[in-house]
């Protein structure tokens, strides 16, 4: 009986050792860093002074992301926006109004298949009067391996608030 038991233990041990030696498929190596550039256009929203003075805007953002986990990326964004004056507005604006440069921290949550992402930016915008707090909510959809469509809502809280809804195209490098 002991001889049979030892034989079974020996066979199980041999089988487990053989199973452990099987080749596992190599995992795809992913670069943990990502560089993105986006161009977007949109309209001014809200019921305040900025909505009366400005009509449309154009924005350019450069983003550097680090893959914290498979689905979460964090990093920083440098952006520039130019708001075009509304032709029907009788309000005179100063030279610097309608233009700003922003510095912000950013995050993005990606779906399991990396097709969609939801994210946001929070930072500071320089150029609107003295500058102010900026936040941006974004929703994106990957079109190809290196590009996608991005929709965003941006608000700058300064002497007056400036809000815009934009849609644009983003390139991944």
Image (cartoon, rainbow, N blue to C red):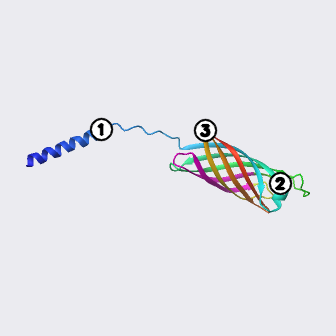
Q: Nearer the viewer, residue 54 or 157?
A: 54
Residue 148, picture quadrant: top right
Q: Residue 52 location, x and y as percent?
A: 84, 58
Relative to 7, 49 lies left or right: right
Do the numbered discs 1 and 2 sit on residues whose CB atoms are within 8 Å?
no
Query: How busy is the neighbourhood of tag 2: few (under 14 within 10 Å), some, or many (20 plus)?
Result: many
Please determine whether, in this image, residue 35 is positioned above or below residue 120: above
Q: Nearer the viewer, residue 35 or 28?
A: 28
Residue 105, picture quadrant: bottom right
Residue highlighted by disc 1: 21
Q: Quadrant of the C terminus?
A: top right
Considering the numbered disc 2 on the image, is that residue within a helix, a strand or a loop?
strand
Query: How busy is the neighbourhood of tag 3: few (under 14 within 10 Å), some, or many (20 plus)?
Result: few
Residue highlighted by disc 2: 54
Which numbered disc covers residue 159? none
Asked if the stretch drawn in magenta spans residue 78, the answer is no
**Mark 1 or 2, which is nearer the eye?**
2
Please determine whether, in this image, residue 46 is positioned above or below residue 152: below
Q: Residue furthest right?
A: 90
**Picture residue at 78% right of the left edge, 49% below the top:** 57
**Picture residue at 39% right of the left edge, 37% below the top:** 25
Q: Residue 130 location, x and y as percent?
A: 79, 58
C-alpha span from label 3 to label 2: 33 Å
Considering the numbered disc 1 on the image, is that residue within a helix, a strand or a loop?
loop
Residue 97 visible in the current orientation = no
The mark that comes first in sequence, 1 or 2, is 1
Q: For the magenta stretch, what is the residue range?
A: 101-125
Residue highlighted by disc 3: 146
Do the numbered discs 3 and 2 sit on residues whose CB atoms are within 8 Å?
no
Query: How busy is the neighbourhood of tag 1: few (under 14 within 10 Å), some, or many (20 plus)?
Result: few
The mark that comes first in sequence, 3 or 2, is 2
């Amino acid at each position: 009986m002991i001889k049979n038991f030892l034989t079974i233990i020996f066979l199980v041990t041999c089988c487990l050792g053989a199973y452990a030696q099987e080749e596992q498929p190599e995992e795809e190596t992913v670069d943990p860093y990502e560089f993105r550039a986006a161009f977007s256009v949109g309209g001014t929203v809200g019921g305040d002074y900025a909505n009366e003075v400005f009509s449309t805007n154009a924005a350019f953002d450069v983003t550097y992301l680090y893959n914290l986990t498979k689905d979460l990326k964090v990093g920083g964004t440098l952006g520039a926006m130019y708001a075009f004056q509304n032709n029907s507005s009788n309000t005179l604006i100063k030279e610097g109004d309608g233009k700003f440069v922003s510095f912000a921290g950013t995050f993005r949550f990606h779906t399991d298949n990396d097709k969609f992402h939801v994210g946001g930016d929070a930072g500071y915008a320089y150029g609107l009067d003295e500058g102010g707090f900026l936040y941006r909510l974004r929703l994106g959809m990957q079109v190809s391996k290196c590009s996608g469509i991005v929709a965003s809502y941006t608000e700058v809280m300064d002497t007056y608030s400036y809000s815009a809804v934009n849609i644009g195209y983003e390139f991944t490098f």
